[in-house]
Image (cartoon, helix red, strand yellow):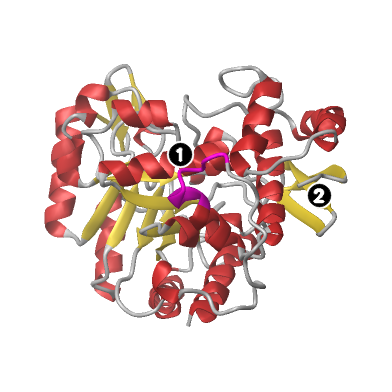
Amino acid sequence: MKIILIKSREILTSKGTPTVEVVLATAKGQFVASVPSGVSTSDYEAVEIPANEAVKKIAEIEPLLKACEFFSQKEFDCFLIKQDGTKNKSRLGANTILALSIAFARAMALENNQQLFEYLGQEVKEGAKLLPARRSFAPSSRNIEISTYHLPRPCVLLFEGGKHGPADGGLTFQEIMLAPSGGSFQEMLDKAKNVFADLQSQLNYPLGVEGGMVAPLKEEEILDLISQHTTEPIGIDAAASSFFSQGKYNLGGQEISTGNLLAFYQTLKENYNILFLEDPFSQNDIRAWKKAKEIFAVGDDLLATNIKRMKKAKKFCWGAIIKPNQIGTVWETLQAVQLAKKFGWKIIVSHRAGETNDSFIADLAVGIGADFIKAGGLTQPVRLAKYNRLIEIEKQLS
């Protein structure tokens, strides 16, 4: 596939911070992609460069990309990785590379006469191998093989705290979510929507950066409130690296040991319907992580969507958070998914705090067969873009 033109510009995320948007043109059309940015980030993520620098980098490498013909996601992404030439994508920037990578994936999907989620599903199943573009598929309006795909369970944000909350206290954990079970994606989303509406009418607290309520309440108070309204499972993102310092955890203004924090988590699991605990310990508190699997721990900062990190944590986790901008290419994201599946982990595709209207992660979640998706609250257009795309896919599959 030949690239005819690449344009880029700065746009704003939901936090009002600059990010990069790319338009990649082929003979088949124009393909747009934009990338989010995180607030609570891992030490092991690929490097994000300023958006204005990303625009300059894209202009620099456009002639190189137009001079080549690419036949697979792996070939395109590896070309960009080679042009960057660093271990952490610090020269071109993970945001620069990912925007190009996602736009290319959309172009390849159309080249193959596929939906984006179908293309991503094919890539992950085939091991993201270097394969020529397929040209024999029927038009994308054809009947899709329904049994091949399933919708992820939504983890809908209800409350947020930590780095997403007020500086003067309240919730130490970063996110408390509802993960409804049973029924269609639309039905599960409706369950979460109704619970959030009931809580919001009762509490009327302001909303945070990801669309959840920011309440001056402690963890157990919030869990009590949720449990009064529903028996559906709850997901927690502790983001423990944000309250870890010098071997201790500062939980609600009180310094506690790793052992006491583990005991606190075990108490929460006994008293509430907790489905999983994301980042229950600091990304660098490896001794604690060795005990984490018993509390259904999910790795985010610990893993950073990086297969080298994942291999080291094979025995620690129940599940893995998948964030494409942590690693910087679609192909490497799919590699991480393959490894998580090999380990038998649950897969949770996730948004970031500073989001755009790009719905790529919705197609990614369906294509790879993710167990869950985190896309934030139900109050911001950038979050709803992901949920609405999933509803659209569900209708297509039905």
- Rendered view: 395 above or below 311: below
Q: Quadrant of residue 301?
A: top left
Comparing 145 with 257, the one in front is 145
Region in magenta = 123-130
Residue, disc 1: 335
Residue type at numbered disc 2: Val
Where does the image place residue 293, in percent across and percent down from the top left? 19, 40
Crowd around label 2: few <14 · some 14–19 · many ≥20 (10 Å): some
Relative height, residue 326 to residue 208 (above, below): above
* Residue 383 visible at all: no
* Residue at horizontal 47 percent and vertical 30 percent from the top: 42
Query: What secondary structure is the magenta-colored segment mainly?
Result: loop
**Which residue is at the front of the view, 279 or 113?**
113
Residue receiving disc 2: 23
Q: Residue at x 30, y 67 (%)?
A: 226
Q: Residue extending furthest front?
A: 136
